[in-house]
Amino acid sequence: MATDSPNRTVLIVEDAESCATTLEIALLAIPHVKVRVAPTARQALDLLTAGGGFCAVVTDLNLPAMDGFEFIQRVRSDSRTARLPIVVISGDSDPRTPERIYRLGANAYFGKPYSPAQVRQKLEQLLDANSPSHSP
């Protein structure tokens, strides 16, 4: 069965339900995108390594059990997920956080409060840049 668009499922890693819902609504406005939500980094890693066909990850840093920094490291160290675009959203007030997450391999950073529309726009850019059917 042929489809017009590739599987574009974005994984949101966020333990605060209201934040996850806000992001989900914003990202579902991207054409052909589906969204899955994982409330913990461990759950997210399980979904990613199970071959869920994810095309990107949007994660918070302040997560239970495993923080977002370790999560990013693990995603980048696994050959199956190493190239996934990662967008970080965090209320972390440490001014070194953006530099730290970029060094770990994140593609974008948004401090809280953030604009869901800006996150959606950045994610669209990342998805288009990584799309195998995207040709200039």
Image (cartoon, rainbow, N blue to C red):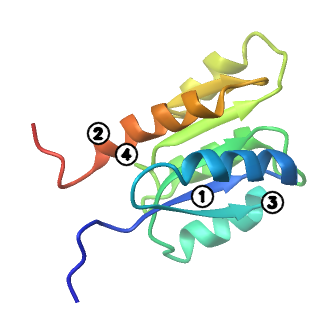
The numbered mark, 4 or 3, whose residue comes first in the sequence reads: 3
Report the quarter where the C terminus lies.
Answer: top left
3D distance between C-alphas at marks 3 and 1: 10 Å
Q: Mark 1 belongs to which amino acid?
A: Leu
Relative height, residue 89 to residue 96 (above, below): below
Q: Position of residue 61 (x, y in %)?
A: 77, 38
Q: Bin the neighbour count of mark 1 within 10 Å (Cα to Cα): few under 14, some 14-19, many 20 and up.
A: many
Q: Residue at x 90, y 52 (%)?
A: 64
Q: Which residue is mark 4?
A: 127
Estimate the spatial distance between the alpha carbons at disc 2 and disc 1, rounded to whole Å.
Answer: 18 Å
Say which element carries label 3: loop
Query: Between marks 3 and 2, how big is the CA–CA gap?
Result: 27 Å
Of helix, strand and loop, which one carries label 2?
helix
For marks 4 and 3, give the CA distance: 23 Å
Q: Residues within 10 Å of mark 3 (few under 14, many from 20)?
A: some
Q: For mark 2, what is the residue?
A: 129
Q: Secondary structure at mark 1?
A: strand
Specify the amino acid type for callout 4: Leu
Q: Say what amino acid the circle numbered 3 marks.
A: Pro
Rendered position, 44 above or below 132? below
Q: Amino acid at mark 2?
A: Ala
The label on residue 49 is: none
The image's mark for residue 11 is 1
Q: Quadrant of residue 117?
A: top right
Nearest to N terminus: mark 3 or mark 1: 1
Dot 2 surroundings within 10 Å: few (below 14), some, or many (20 or more)? few
At 53% from the left and 38% from the top, the residue drawn is 120
Task: Calculate the distance from the C-alpha at mark 1 to the C-alpha at mark 4.
Answer: 13 Å
Q: Give above or below for 102 relative to 63.
A: above
Question: Which residue is painted at 50% across and 58% down in the image?
Answer: 78
Residue 70 percent location from the top left of the image: 72, 44
